[in-house]
Image (tube, rainbow, N blue to C red):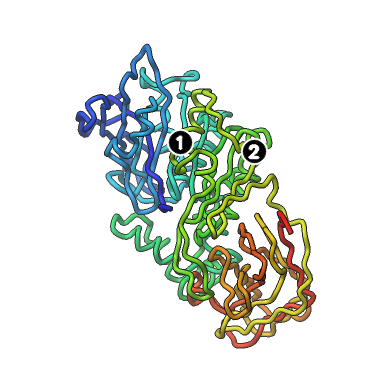
Amino acid sequence: MKTTLGIAAVVATATLSAVPVTTAQAAAPTTRVTNACLTSVPDPGTTEKVQICYSLFRPAGATKRHRVPLIMHSHGWGGSRTTDPAGFQKFLDAGYAVLSFDQRGFGESGGQAYVENPTVEGHDVRRLVRLVSRLPWVQQDGKGDPHLGAIGGSYGGGYQFLGAFEELRVKGKPVFDALAPEITWFDLHESLAPRDVVRTAWASVLTAAAQPSNALPPKILTAFTEGAATGTWPDGSSPTGTNLNPFFRKNGPKWHVDHGRRLDIPVLFGQGTTDSLFPLEQGLQNWKKSITKHARKHSIFVAYNGGHVLPAVTPPGVNVSSDPCSKTLAGGSFEDLSLRFFDEQLKHRHTGLKGYGRYHLATPDSTCTTVGSVRPDKAFDIGTVATTETGGAPLSYAVAQGPIRIAGSSYVTASMTALGATNRAFYGLAVGTTPADAHLVQNNVLPINEAAPVTGEKRRFPLPSVAIDVPEGQTLYLLASPVSDTFVGMGSRTPGAVVLEDTVVHLPVVRR
């Protein structure tokens, strides 16, 4: 699967605050394309207003008398908008307008990226919505309220939640009528540094992607460098006083949810099972917390093998890319599923689409497991689990013999002993015929992080969310490792061991 999705939004003449750049006929003579920019708020601490640039695609037949719904789109981190209508041809042919825009700090847009901050990028998205609300050929639900969907992956999923939540916060309703975010986050801090242990591999990739356009403020680049060097999320406690928490506090659905806001609109979630930046659990948290119970009845959750993927060498993982659930639900790709979803939710056209209100999770062998709950409901006692610190091979401990199917979120309870300073280890679920050949189910591990020595302390910590069919003859293991190539350099600072006693693994078992 790709790490970003291109599909998006609208054709326009320059209106009001929009500053026209170029206007041209698209390759398909029936689609009209306008490239333009509008003016948004200055970056924090500056006075110069920022230009946000976009491409607007007006499909054939869109007129004042035949208004069409619009799909907004934006790119992933380090990318830029889609300017070729071929990228949205399925949507244009189906009668949707599309607007694709360069997010602040990228492409032709000005300013620097504040990573979907409501007080910065929030203004950008709201001004684009206002632009669309004044297009006479776009369907409107009321004044300032266009009939609107949204697509995009990763950072292009982040703007969707930002826009809908900000409209809800400011206007009392989300304005967006349906969303289809892919491989995006619920809690950005937890994604970048679970338990304050920095995902250094991804921190390096993201900062490198921001440098060509000078997208990130210098102090944030410095903070990431410090985090990689120290092995700890900069929270203001170091001698330098560098603190990333204020920068990232509002940057995601979690902040809105913490302030009592939830979206009551249908959402098609796409999340990567092998994604090691915004893993499956981030999508599950969005499903559980970002939308209402009513909205979940009209929403669909799809997980595919893909997303933000790095090679999983230590501990060893799998290399698979597939989307069996979109194929099962819509007979094709996630884009095909998105189109049918919008036809039902925006055009109220019955297409026979099934799967609402449920989770559809891809397994490593490219089958689709559909469940109504992802909560752990079975407990497995596995005794003592130990791993060295600072170095050594991963060790696997048997949890359950196949055949067994699990799908969803898991966790561990145990009594922990670790006598060093800044004790860390990494845990995940693995499958194999023996401990020697066991490999991570879907490439992910999560850390424990104990700053001080502990002796026999009760602990509960999450495992990566997964979906797996363990066949007869193979075993599901709890894998414990002192190191992880996703968290390079983030292991313990002193030699020793992390020992878990009376260990219980809690799993979401579908079938045994």
Of residues 350 and 464, which is closer to you in this image? 350
Residue under the point 35% across and 14% down: 64
Q: In the image, what residue type sits under mark 2?
A: Gly
Q: Residues within 10 Å of mark 1 (few under 14, many from 20)?
A: many
Foreground label between 1 and 2: 2
Q: Nearer the viewer, residue 143 or 78?
A: 78
Residue 257: horizontal and vertical position, in percent? 63, 44
User: How many numbered tags mark residues here?
Assistant: 2
Marks 1 and 2 in Cβ contact (< 8 Å): no
Q: CA distance from mark 1 to mark 2?
A: 20 Å
Q: Is 425 left or right of 82, judged from the image as shown?
A: right
Q: Is residue 502 left or right of residue 205?
A: right
Q: For mark 1, give the secondary structure.
A: strand
Instruction: Say whether residue 26 is left or right of residue 496.
Output: left
Instruction: Examine the rendering and report whether any part of residue 256 can be seen.
Output: yes
Q: Note whether 374 is above or below 234 in the view shown.
A: above
Residue with the most extreme bottom position:
495
| Residue under label 1 | 150
Is residue 161 depicted above or below 365 in this figure? Answer: above
User: In which quadrant will I find the C terminus?
Assistant: bottom right
Circle 1: residue type:
Ala
- Residue 54 lies in what quarter of the image? top left
Question: Residue at (65%, 34%) from the top-left corner?
Answer: 297
Q: Residues within 10 Å of mark 2 (few under 14, many from 20)?
A: many
Give the residue number, with chain letter if any, for mark 2: 357
User: Which mark is drawn over residue 458?
Assistant: none
Question: 82 or 353: which is nearer to us?
Answer: 353
Which residue corresponds to the image point at 64% horizontal and 82% vertical from the top-left? Answer: 387
Q: Residue at x 38, y 57 (%)?
A: 217
Residue 166: x and y, percent? 52, 37
* Residue 209 in the image, given as x and y percentages of width and height: 35, 59
